[in-house]
Image (cartoon, helix red, strand yellow):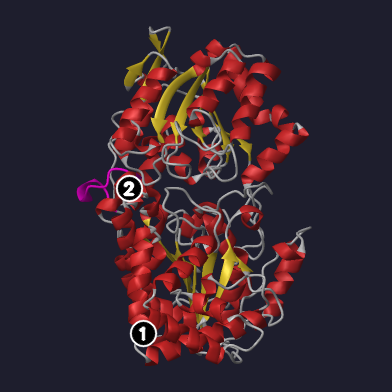
């Protein structure tokens, strides 16, 4: 821990790195540290305990310090209930213990044992650690940071809603908590306004009056806070069925559902196997449909890898579109046959996300096809993975062409029809262009967050100050739309530069998100090179970048363990390199994560905290409040970046005071450093 006063940097520069999906599991960390101590060579264990006894005052337990000393990153084991003063005392003592072990040349032995035990228990952050980066984290100000539940704008439920990239990047860019759209939707269900939503109701009624059918899609997830709820929430599906079948009184034979299987933000085989839910999501869906005598309304089943592709791979959109409009897919008669096909995928080692198009024939005769003038309602609330699908169904060729080309892809569009003219309603706003240019209704409009650092950039900085956003294409919207506080790029902006590196595609053997294990490092090194060059040029006062590998490959656990470990190694190695480049070029550096993922041997995001580390260009830093709690929130990162580049605290506080509304103090950010 480096302490001391930090000088004010009138025109400082800072780099903010978001390591996507890199959290830590406090319970596993404590358990593994006990195992390491238990398996140490007796001589080494004695030396460890002697060192702990030597540095520990009577108020601390030497064994507790010893457990912290065998961890690669001390902050992961320190209780967030401590004050900063207490935490610094503990961190300094652990540093002293490690120094004594280093003098005795015992750290390598401990590290080797730690990696072996981590491999046995499949804990990637310890197995794939980079000692250089761990040392940097331990020697600089590092704080556990909340990245799930109410702290990222979700409902207050137990278990908490897992974190995700969308809300994580919003919070990182915002100066205060950004409430999320699913909370707004759930509140509308509670107060009854959901059932009177004019955009959904009018879309349904207009189609019915014209003799057309009601088609909709929903990602099967989110029964609880811990099993998805990233793109969809089960209570939203239940409310929609109540609206359609009870409130409006639609006949089930006029309704067609596309059930999208998750396997990524929800358990890998959650469609069939889900703790506490008999028969998994498909079982729960069957029970819900049976309640309304509406089993025949299930028309299409497909994995999200095809139906929710956000990297604009044309072949995936063709599969999804042809399924809905032409009935193309593996034909089955009922949900039991759907289960058979899904099980075959699981037996091949694939997840729910990999399931191909399945079409159900009503009465074993008719296959559902969307017809011109039908209604199509998308019940998924997160925007980035609904854009390609929505654009295709509403005929937005120019939009798709533009987005595909920005990712290095060229579409030919020969498969797209011109006669659909669907009545469309999106649960939330996926892109304002769909509503403005293609008549897509939005049930729950999304408004940009008022307290976003980048949206106030021109008010807080000088006219010639620039910021830079860097990401690979699969995360382009995160280091763009989301980090700007749900804003598209301002046309003609002179303040923002944005560099997007095309993610691997078909030429590299990556046909869907499930294939990123083929090149698990992804574009980590290319992004690091671009960021290093940008810092060398020194033209940008603030640089923000996303490193995607630990999230995208982490979603392929437990199957792709070695690939995920490689993704982790590459990420932390790059962080160590960037810290040196930043210091050499006068940039402070903040490293954080948007949510947890790769630390658990499962494909889903987690409710775990993440770490935020601050390395200043001046080499010295003090925490914001020595008597305050040793923890942070993601919406503290923007305040920290502002402080590091020299934006006055009074300037930020003035903006917060104008736009905070009725937010409680605990939901307003503050700089991690003084």
Q: Quadrant of the C terminus?
A: bottom right
Q: Which residue is mark 2?
A: 559
**Residue drawn at (35%, 19%), measured in percent from left and top?**
326
Magenta stretch? 504-513
Q: Which residue is mark 1?
A: 106
The quarter holding residue 247 reads top right
For residue 625, side relative to residue 513 (left or right) = right
Per the picture, the main secondary structure of the magenta-coloured stretch is loop
Mark 1 residue crowding within 10 angstroms, few (<14) / some (14–19) / many (20+): some
Q: Nearer the viewer, residue 503 or 65?
A: 65
Check whether the beta carbons of the residues at disc 2 and disc 1 lie within 8 A of each other. Answer: no
Which mark is on residue 352? none
Q: Secondary structure at mark 2?
A: loop
Q: Quick check: 54 above or below 483?
A: below
Q: Position of residue 259 (x, y in %)?
A: 47, 28
Q: Nearer the viewer, residue 120 or 632?
A: 120
Q: Position of residue 620 (x, y in %)?
A: 54, 89
Q: Nearer the viewer, residue 447 or 147?
A: 147
For residue 541, side relative to residue 656 (left or right) = left
Q: Position of residue 588 (x, y in %)?
A: 49, 81
Badge 2 or badge 1: first in the primary sequence: 1
Q: Residue furthest front?
A: 42
Q: Residue furthest left?
A: 507
For residue 390, side relative to residue 120 (left or right) = right
Residue 588 appears in view: no
**Residue drawn at (33%, 61%), measured in percent from left and top?**
565
Residue 475 appears in view: yes
- Give the alpha-carbon distance from disc 2 to disc 1, as whole Å: 34 Å
The quarter holding residue 185 reads top right
Q: Quick check: 148 above or below 467?
A: above
């Amino acid at each position: 821990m480096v302490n001391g006063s930090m000088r004010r940097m009138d025109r400082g520069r800072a780099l903010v790195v978001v390591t996507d999906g890199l959290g830590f599991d406090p319970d596993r960390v404590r358990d593994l540290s006990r195992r390491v101590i238990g398996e140490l060579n007796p001589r080494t264990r004695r030396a460890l305990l002697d060192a702990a006894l030597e540095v520990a005052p009577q108020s601390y337990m030497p064994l507790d310090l010893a457990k912290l000393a065998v961890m690669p990153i001390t902050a992961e084991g320190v209780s967030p209930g401590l004050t900063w003063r207490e935490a610094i005392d503990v961190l300094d003592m652990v540093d002293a213990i490690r120094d004594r072990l280093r003098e005795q040349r015992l750290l390598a032995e401990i590290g080797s044992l730690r990696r072996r035990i981590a491999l046995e228990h499949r804990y990637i952050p310890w197995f794939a650690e980079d000692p250089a980066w761990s040392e940097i984290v331990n020697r600089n100000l590092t704080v556990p940071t909340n990245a799930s539940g109410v702290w990222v704008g979700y409902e207050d439920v137990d278990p908490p809603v897992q974190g995700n990239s969308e809300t994580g990047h919003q919070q990182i860019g915002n100066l205060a908590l950004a409430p999320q759209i699913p909370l707004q939707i759930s509140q509308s269900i509670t107060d009854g306004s959901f059932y009177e939503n004019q955009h959904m109701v009018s879309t349904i009624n207009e189609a019915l009056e014209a003799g057309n059918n009601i088609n909709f899609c929903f990602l099967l997830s989110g029964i609880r806070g811990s099993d998805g709820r990233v793109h969809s929430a089960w209570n939203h599906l239940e409310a929609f069925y109540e609206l359609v079948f009870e409130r409006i009184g639609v006949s089930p034979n006029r309704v067609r559902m596309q059930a999208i299987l998750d396997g990524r933000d929800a358990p890998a085989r959650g469609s069939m196997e889900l703790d506490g839910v008999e028969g998994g999501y498909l079982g729960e869906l069957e029970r819900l449909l049976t309640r309304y005598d509406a089993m025949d309304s299930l028309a299409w089943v497909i994995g999200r890898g095809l139906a929710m592709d956000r990297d604009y791979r044309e072949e995936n959109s063709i599969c999804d579109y042809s399924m809905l409009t032409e009935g193309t897919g593996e034909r089955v008669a009922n949900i039991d046959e759907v289960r058979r096909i899904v099980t075959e995928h699981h037996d091949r080692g694939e997840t729910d996300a990999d399931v191909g198009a399945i079409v159900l024939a009503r009465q074993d005769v008719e296959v559902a096809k969307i017809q011109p003038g039908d209604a199509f309602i998308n019940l998924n609330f997160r925007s980035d993975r609904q854009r390609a699908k929505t654009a295709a169904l509403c005929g937005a060729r120019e939009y798709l062409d533009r987005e595909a080309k920005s990712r290095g892809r060229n579409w030919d569009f020969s498969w797209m029809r011109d006669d659909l003219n669907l009545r469309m309603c999106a649960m939330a706003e996926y892109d304002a262009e769909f509503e403005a240019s293609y008549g897509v209704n939005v049930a729950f409009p999304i408004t940009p967050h008022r307290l976003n650092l980048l949206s106030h950039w021109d008010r807080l900085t000088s006219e010639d100050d620039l910021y830079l956003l860097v990401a690979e294409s699969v995360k382009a919207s995160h280091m763009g739309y989301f980090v700007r506080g749900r804003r598209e790029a301002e046309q003609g902006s002179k303040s923002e530069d944005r560099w997007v590196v095309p993610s691997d595609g078909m030429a590299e053997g990556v046909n869907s998100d499930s294939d990123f294990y083929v090149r698990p490092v992804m574009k980590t090194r290319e992004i690091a090179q671009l960021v290093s060059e940008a810092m060398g040029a020194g033209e940008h006062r603030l640089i923000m970048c996303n490193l995607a590998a630990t999230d995208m490959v982490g979603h392929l656990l437990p199957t792709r363990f070695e690939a995920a470990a490689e993704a982790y190694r590459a990420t932390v190695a790059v962080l160590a390199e960037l810290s040196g480049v930043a210091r050499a070029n006068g940039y402070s550096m903040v490293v954080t994560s948007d949510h947890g993922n790769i630390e658990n041997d499962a494909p889903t995001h987690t409710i775990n905290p993440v770490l935020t580390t601050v390395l200043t260009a001046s080499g010295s830093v003090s925490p914001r409040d020595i008597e305050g709690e040793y923890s942070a929130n993601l919406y503290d990162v923007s305040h920290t970046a502002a402080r590091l580049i020299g934006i006055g605290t009074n300037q930020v506080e003035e903006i917060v005071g104008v736009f905070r509304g009725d937010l409680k103090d605990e939901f307003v950010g503050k700089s991690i450093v003084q």
